Amino acid sequence: MSVVTVTGAIQAKKEHVDAFRSAFITYTKACANEPGVLVFNTHEAIDLPGYFVAYERWESMEVFEEHMQGKLLADFVAATGEFIEHAEDPRFLNPLAEGVVK
């Protein structure tokens, strides 16, 4: 099995940025306990408040797909759906080179 790296981006509605940010932080912390997660980091664009990006690494496509079908994500989507202006399709990434992590 090979590691899966994926990104996703969400633009929150202007009137719901704070609520979405709070829910996204809570969701991110919960994802740390998901089986097979190696990295689950979330970010907000400095120059575009309300534009959020997730960077995820999973042990395999199988565990990623289990996460995508799981209760944690379903509950997050149900709780935040009205806050979202637009969600981009996930992007799967191929590694080119390892950098330095300090």
Image (tube, helix red, strand yellow):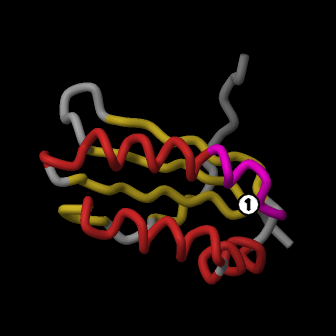
* Residue in the picture at 26% in, 59% down: 83
* Amino acid under disc 1: Trp
* Residue in the picture at 60% in, 76% down: 68
Q: Which of 24/48 is in front?
A: 24
Q: Position of residue 86 (x, y in %)?
A: 22, 64
In the rendered view, tell whether residue 31 sits above or below residue 76.
above
Q: Which residues are magenta?
A: 29-35
Q: Position of residue 30 (x, y in %)?
A: 68, 52
In the rendered view, tell whether residue 53 sits above or below residue 77.
above
Q: Is residue 19 left or right of residue 62?
A: left
In the rendered view, tell whether residue 49 sits above or below residue 12.
above
* Residue in the picture at 86% in, 72% down: 1
Q: Which of 70/1 is in front?
A: 70
Q: Quadrant of the C terminus?
A: top right
Q: Which of 13/59 is in front?
A: 13
Under circle 1, the secondary element is strand
Q: Is residue 16 left or right of residue 77?
A: left
Q: Position of residue 37 (x, y in %)?
A: 76, 56
In the rendered view, tell whether residue 41 sits above or below residue 75.
above
Q: Which of 40/25 is in front?
A: 25
Residue where numbered disc 1 is placed: 58
